[in-house]
Amino acid sequence: MYYQLSFKTGRYIVEKVSDHPNGVVVKVTAVLIHPKQGDLHHPHETEVFFHERKALAQYEKRIVSPNLLKPYDDAVPAYEASLYKAVTAMEEKLAAEPTSFNQLALQKMQSLKKEYAHYYGIKFDDFSNNEG
């Protein structure tokens, strides 16, 4: 069974692996919403340490509280396709309002895209070659 998990500022599709004394162990299978960039304690500010936040990795395991898991009944996309969609959606949202914060966040997203391309083979400029 698949679940939806909100973790920090991202949202993921996960599956339960096992019980754990501190909760349940889940494994990441897809990304629904990419984590936000920047300092969460000082939102929309650029004159602070600006965090680069990666999405949880494919098959990454986390111990979470069971009450954070919500059933997920839709089709589960491939991790790479879901990451591409989440990154693209985040970039579109940031580009829609050209603030200094959003511009810095877009720079962080460019850096992350290079890393994702390296690890997952995603070509963000031509994703049609990655599907199938």
Image (cartoon, rainbow, N blue to C red):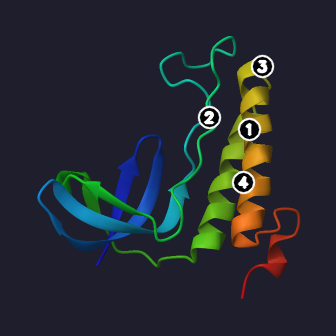
Q: Which mark is residue 100?
A: 3
For marks 2 and 4, give the one nearer the viewer. 2
Residue 21 percent location from the top left of the image:
11, 58
Determine whether the residue tagged by mark 1 lies in a helix, strand or loop: helix
Query: Which mark, by number, is residue 29?
Result: none
Residue at the spot of label 4: 88
Q: Earlier in the sequence, mark 2 or mark 3?
A: 2
- Furthest residue to the left? 21
Question: Residue under circle 1?
Answer: 108
Question: In this rendering, is residue 66 above or below 35?
Answer: below
CB under 8 Å between discs 1 and 3: no
What amino acid is found at the position of numbered circle 3 in the picture?
Ser
Q: Name the residue type under label 1.
A: Lys
Q: Residues within 10 Å of mark 1 (few under 14, many from 20)?
A: some
Q: Earlier in the sequence, mark 2 or mark 4?
A: 2
**Nearest to N terminus: mark 4 or mark 3:** 4
The location of residue 110, given as percent across then percent down, is 80, 45
